[in-house]
Amino acid sequence: MARVRWTIGNWKQNLFRGTAELLATDIVEGIPAELLEGPVRTKIGVAPTLVALDALAPWSRPAGPLYLFGQNCAAQEEGAFTGEVGPGQLADVGAHGAILGHSERRTHFREDDALIARKVQCALQAGLRVVLCVGEGLEVRESGEHENFVISQLSASLAEVDPELFQDRLILAYEPVWAIGTGKTASARDVGAMHKRIRSWLTEHHGATGADRSILYGGSVKPGNAAGLMAAGDVDGFLVGGASLEAEAFLQIVRLVAEAS
Protein backbone atom coordinates (compact mmCIF):
# COMPACT_ATOMS: atom_id res chain seq x y z
CA MET A 1 0.00 0.00 0.00
CA ALA A 2 1.49 3.35 -1.08
CA ARG A 3 1.96 5.81 1.75
CA VAL A 4 -0.12 8.97 1.57
CA ARG A 5 1.70 12.28 1.25
CA TRP A 6 0.45 15.14 3.39
CA THR A 7 1.00 18.88 3.60
CA ILE A 8 -0.66 20.24 6.76
CA GLY A 9 -0.57 23.88 7.80
CA ASN A 10 -0.56 24.51 11.55
CA TRP A 11 -1.85 28.06 11.97
CA LYS A 12 -1.31 27.99 15.75
CA GLN A 13 -2.81 30.93 17.72
CA ASN A 14 -3.08 33.14 14.64
CA LEU A 15 -5.88 34.60 12.53
CA PHE A 16 -9.47 35.49 13.29
CA ARG A 17 -12.40 33.86 11.53
CA GLY A 18 -12.46 36.36 8.67
CA THR A 19 -8.75 36.21 7.90
CA ALA A 20 -8.80 32.43 8.25
CA GLU A 21 -11.56 32.25 5.65
CA LEU A 22 -9.57 34.51 3.29
CA LEU A 23 -6.44 32.40 3.66
CA ALA A 24 -8.39 29.17 3.09
CA THR A 25 -9.97 30.71 -0.03
CA ASP A 26 -6.57 31.69 -1.44
CA ILE A 27 -5.17 28.20 -0.75
CA VAL A 28 -8.12 26.38 -2.31
CA GLU A 29 -8.13 28.60 -5.40
CA GLY A 30 -4.41 28.01 -5.87
CA ILE A 31 -4.35 24.21 -5.53
CA PRO A 32 -3.23 22.66 -8.85
CA ALA A 33 -6.18 21.11 -10.66
CA GLU A 34 -4.36 17.81 -11.14
CA LEU A 35 -4.32 17.28 -7.38
CA LEU A 36 -8.11 17.46 -7.29
CA GLU A 37 -8.74 14.91 -10.03
CA GLY A 38 -8.71 11.13 -9.82
CA PRO A 39 -7.12 9.04 -7.06
CA VAL A 40 -4.87 11.41 -5.14
CA ARG A 41 -2.04 10.26 -2.87
CA THR A 42 -1.37 13.85 -1.81
CA LYS A 43 -3.66 15.33 0.83
CA ILE A 44 -3.80 18.89 2.08
CA GLY A 45 -4.81 19.92 5.58
CA VAL A 46 -4.99 23.03 7.72
CA ALA A 47 -5.29 23.44 11.47
CA PRO A 48 -6.87 26.79 12.33
CA THR A 49 -7.75 27.95 15.82
CA LEU A 50 -10.73 26.19 17.34
CA VAL A 51 -13.04 29.18 16.86
CA ALA A 52 -12.32 29.24 13.11
CA LEU A 53 -12.84 25.54 12.39
CA ASP A 54 -16.51 25.78 11.48
CA ALA A 55 -15.85 28.85 9.31
CA LEU A 56 -13.65 26.73 7.05
CA ALA A 57 -16.28 24.01 6.57
CA PRO A 58 -17.19 25.18 3.01
CA TRP A 59 -13.66 24.27 1.84
CA SER A 60 -13.38 21.00 3.76
CA ARG A 61 -13.74 17.42 2.57
CA PRO A 62 -15.71 15.86 1.06
CA ALA A 63 -17.16 18.90 -0.74
CA GLY A 64 -13.82 20.74 -0.83
CA PRO A 65 -10.14 19.77 -0.98
CA LEU A 66 -9.08 20.54 2.60
CA TYR A 67 -8.85 18.25 5.62
CA LEU A 68 -9.42 20.22 8.82
CA PHE A 69 -7.47 19.49 11.98
CA GLY A 70 -7.87 20.68 15.53
CA GLN A 71 -4.64 21.83 17.17
CA ASN A 72 -5.40 19.79 20.27
CA CYS A 73 -8.00 17.38 21.63
CA ALA A 74 -9.17 16.25 25.07
CA ALA A 75 -8.22 12.88 26.54
CA GLN A 76 -11.90 12.12 27.15
CA GLU A 77 -15.01 12.31 25.00
CA GLU A 78 -17.01 14.56 27.33
CA GLY A 79 -17.69 15.38 30.96
CA ALA A 80 -16.87 17.87 33.72
CA PHE A 81 -13.58 19.07 32.21
CA THR A 82 -13.77 22.85 31.96
CA GLY A 83 -11.98 24.27 28.93
CA GLU A 84 -11.57 20.94 27.14
CA VAL A 85 -12.95 19.95 23.72
CA GLY A 86 -13.57 16.30 22.95
CA PRO A 87 -13.01 14.51 19.63
CA GLY A 88 -16.72 14.22 18.93
CA GLN A 89 -17.10 17.96 19.44
CA LEU A 90 -14.22 18.60 17.04
CA ALA A 91 -15.90 16.41 14.45
CA ASP A 92 -19.18 18.23 15.06
CA VAL A 93 -17.66 21.53 13.85
CA GLY A 94 -16.06 19.91 10.81
CA ALA A 95 -12.66 18.64 11.95
CA HIS A 96 -11.31 15.47 10.37
CA GLY A 97 -8.48 15.06 12.87
CA ALA A 98 -6.28 16.59 15.56
CA ILE A 99 -2.61 17.42 16.09
CA LEU A 100 -1.43 15.81 19.34
CA GLY A 101 1.87 15.88 21.21
CA HIS A 102 3.11 19.05 19.50
CA SER A 103 6.32 20.35 21.08
CA GLU A 104 4.57 23.54 22.17
CA ARG A 105 1.95 21.51 24.05
CA ARG A 106 4.65 19.37 25.64
CA THR A 107 6.81 22.36 26.61
CA HIS A 108 4.40 25.18 27.46
CA PHE A 109 1.56 23.12 28.89
CA ARG A 110 3.58 20.26 30.39
CA GLU A 111 1.77 17.53 28.48
CA ASP A 112 3.56 14.23 29.08
CA ASP A 113 3.55 11.00 27.10
CA ALA A 114 0.93 9.37 29.35
CA LEU A 115 -1.56 12.18 28.71
CA ILE A 116 -0.76 12.22 25.01
CA ALA A 117 -1.33 8.45 24.84
CA ARG A 118 -4.82 8.89 26.31
CA LYS A 119 -5.55 11.71 23.86
CA VAL A 120 -4.40 9.64 20.88
CA GLN A 121 -6.52 6.66 21.92
CA CYS A 122 -9.59 8.82 22.54
CA ALA A 123 -9.30 10.65 19.21
CA LEU A 124 -8.73 7.49 17.17
CA GLN A 125 -11.59 5.68 18.90
CA ALA A 126 -13.85 8.59 17.95
CA GLY A 127 -12.89 8.21 14.28
CA LEU A 128 -10.57 11.20 13.96
CA ARG A 129 -7.21 11.20 12.22
CA VAL A 130 -4.30 11.94 14.54
CA VAL A 131 -1.04 13.71 13.74
CA LEU A 132 1.23 12.52 16.55
CA CYS A 133 4.27 14.76 17.02
CA VAL A 134 7.60 13.65 18.47
CA GLY A 135 10.96 15.39 18.65
CA GLU A 136 13.98 16.22 20.77
CA GLY A 137 15.48 19.39 22.21
CA LEU A 138 19.03 20.67 21.70
CA GLU A 139 20.46 19.12 24.86
CA VAL A 140 19.23 15.68 23.85
CA ARG A 141 20.50 16.10 20.28
CA GLU A 142 23.96 17.14 21.47
CA SER A 143 24.11 14.20 23.89
CA GLY A 144 23.72 11.78 20.99
CA GLU A 145 20.62 10.23 22.55
CA HIS A 146 18.19 11.81 20.12
CA GLU A 147 17.04 8.60 18.42
CA ASN A 148 16.48 6.80 21.73
CA PHE A 149 14.62 9.84 23.07
CA VAL A 150 12.27 10.09 20.09
CA ILE A 151 11.56 6.35 20.06
CA SER A 152 10.83 6.54 23.79
CA GLN A 153 8.31 9.34 23.12
CA LEU A 154 6.77 7.36 20.29
CA SER A 155 6.52 4.15 22.27
CA ALA A 156 5.03 5.83 25.34
CA SER A 157 2.60 7.97 23.33
CA LEU A 158 1.22 4.87 21.60
CA ALA A 159 1.24 2.69 24.72
CA GLU A 160 -2.54 2.82 25.23
CA VAL A 161 -3.47 2.77 21.57
CA ASP A 162 -5.17 -0.21 19.95
CA PRO A 163 -3.04 -1.01 16.86
CA GLU A 164 -6.23 -1.77 14.92
CA LEU A 165 -6.96 1.96 15.06
CA PHE A 166 -3.74 2.83 13.20
CA GLN A 167 -5.03 1.96 9.76
CA ASP A 168 -5.42 5.09 7.59
CA ARG A 169 -5.79 7.44 10.55
CA LEU A 170 -2.45 7.66 12.39
CA ILE A 171 0.09 10.12 10.97
CA LEU A 172 3.48 10.77 12.54
CA ALA A 173 5.32 14.10 12.54
CA TYR A 174 8.97 14.50 13.55
CA GLU A 175 9.76 18.03 14.72
CA PRO A 176 13.29 18.61 16.08
CA VAL A 177 12.66 21.27 18.72
CA TRP A 178 16.30 22.36 18.51
CA ALA A 179 15.83 23.44 14.88
CA ILE A 180 12.64 25.49 15.32
CA GLY A 181 13.19 29.24 15.64
CA THR A 182 16.74 28.79 16.96
CA GLY A 183 18.81 29.62 13.91
CA LYS A 184 20.05 26.02 13.81
CA THR A 185 19.14 23.83 10.86
CA ALA A 186 18.28 20.17 10.63
CA SER A 187 20.04 18.79 7.56
CA ALA A 188 18.37 16.41 5.14
CA ARG A 189 20.71 13.76 6.52
CA ASP A 190 19.53 14.44 10.10
CA VAL A 191 15.91 14.23 9.02
CA GLY A 192 16.32 11.14 6.86
CA ALA A 193 18.11 9.25 9.64
CA MET A 194 15.40 10.01 12.19
CA HIS A 195 12.55 9.17 9.83
CA LYS A 196 14.24 5.89 8.95
CA ARG A 197 14.56 5.05 12.66
CA ILE A 198 10.91 5.89 13.31
CA ARG A 199 9.75 3.74 10.39
CA SER A 200 11.97 0.88 11.53
CA TRP A 201 10.36 0.98 14.98
CA LEU A 202 6.85 1.15 13.53
CA THR A 203 7.55 -1.82 11.26
CA GLU A 204 9.13 -3.84 14.05
CA HIS A 205 6.24 -3.29 16.45
CA HIS A 206 3.25 -3.02 14.12
CA GLY A 207 4.21 -4.81 10.91
CA ALA A 208 2.84 -3.61 7.59
CA THR A 209 0.31 -1.36 9.30
CA GLY A 210 3.13 0.52 11.01
CA ALA A 211 5.33 0.57 7.92
CA ASP A 212 2.56 2.25 5.92
CA ARG A 213 2.15 5.20 8.29
CA SER A 214 2.94 8.60 6.81
CA ILE A 215 5.83 10.34 8.57
CA LEU A 216 5.90 14.12 8.14
CA TYR A 217 8.68 16.56 8.96
CA GLY A 218 7.86 19.66 10.97
CA GLY A 219 10.92 21.83 11.57
CA SER A 220 10.77 25.33 10.02
CA VAL A 221 9.72 24.06 6.59
CA LYS A 222 9.84 26.66 3.79
CA PRO A 223 9.65 26.56 -0.01
CA GLY A 224 13.42 26.88 -0.13
CA ASN A 225 14.17 23.72 1.85
CA ALA A 226 11.14 21.53 1.15
CA ALA A 227 12.52 19.78 -1.97
CA GLY A 228 15.78 18.86 -0.24
CA LEU A 229 13.93 17.51 2.77
CA MET A 230 11.59 15.43 0.61
CA ALA A 231 14.67 13.85 -0.97
CA ALA A 232 16.02 12.81 2.44
CA GLY A 233 14.19 9.49 2.36
CA ASP A 234 11.16 8.31 4.35
CA VAL A 235 9.69 11.83 4.35
CA ASP A 236 6.02 11.76 3.35
CA GLY A 237 5.30 15.47 3.56
CA PHE A 238 5.29 18.29 6.06
CA LEU A 239 3.63 19.84 9.08
CA VAL A 240 4.13 23.51 8.21
CA GLY A 241 4.13 26.36 10.73
CA GLY A 242 4.83 29.98 9.79
CA ALA A 243 5.00 29.38 6.03
CA SER A 244 1.43 28.06 6.08
CA LEU A 245 0.16 31.54 6.95
CA GLU A 246 1.13 32.74 3.46
CA ALA A 247 -0.96 31.10 0.74
CA GLU A 248 1.69 31.18 -1.99
CA ALA A 249 4.44 29.82 0.26
CA PHE A 250 2.16 27.02 1.47
CA LEU A 251 1.08 26.19 -2.08
CA GLN A 252 4.69 26.02 -3.22
CA ILE A 253 5.31 23.42 -0.51
CA VAL A 254 2.17 21.52 -1.54
CA ARG A 255 3.44 21.36 -5.13
CA LEU A 256 6.92 20.24 -4.05
CA VAL A 257 5.44 17.43 -1.97
CA ALA A 258 3.22 16.32 -4.87
CA GLU A 259 6.08 16.42 -7.40
CA ALA A 260 8.71 14.65 -5.30
CA SER A 261 9.76 11.33 -6.82
Image: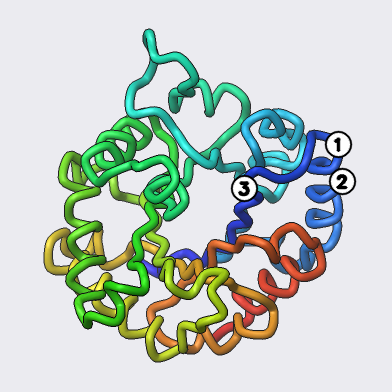
Q: Along the line of sight, which residue is nearer the eye, 104 or 253? A: 104
Tag 1–tag 2 contact (CB < 8 Å): yes
Side (left or right) of 25 relative to 159: right
Callout 3 amino acid: Lys
Looking at the figure, which quarter contains the N terminus? Answer: bottom left
Does label 3 or label 2 sit earlier along the sequence?
A: 3
Tag 3–tag 2 contact (CB < 8 Å): no
Q: Residues within 10 Å of mark 3 (few under 14, many from 20)?
A: some
Q: Residue at x 43, y 37 (%)?
A: 128
Q: Residue 117, image x and y in percent?
A: 25, 41
- Residue located beneath label 2 in the image: 22
- Look at the picture and state if 53 lies above or below 111: above
- Look at the picture and state if 80 lies above or below 28: above
- Residue located beneath label 1 in the image: 18
- Residue located beneath label 3 in the image: 12
Q: Along the line of sight, which residue is nearer the eye, 50 or 39? A: 50
The answer to which quarter of the image holds residue 177 is bottom left
Distance of mark 1 from mark 2, alpha carbons? 6 Å
Numbered tag placed on residue 166 in the rendering: none
The answer to which quarter of the image holds residue 150 is bottom left
Mark yes or no: residue 168 visible: no
Q: Residues within 10 Å of mark 2 (few under 14, many from 20)?
A: some
The answer to which quarter of the image holds residue 136 is bottom left
Q: Residue at x 62, y 25 (%)?
A: 93
Side (left or right) of 35 relative to 159: right
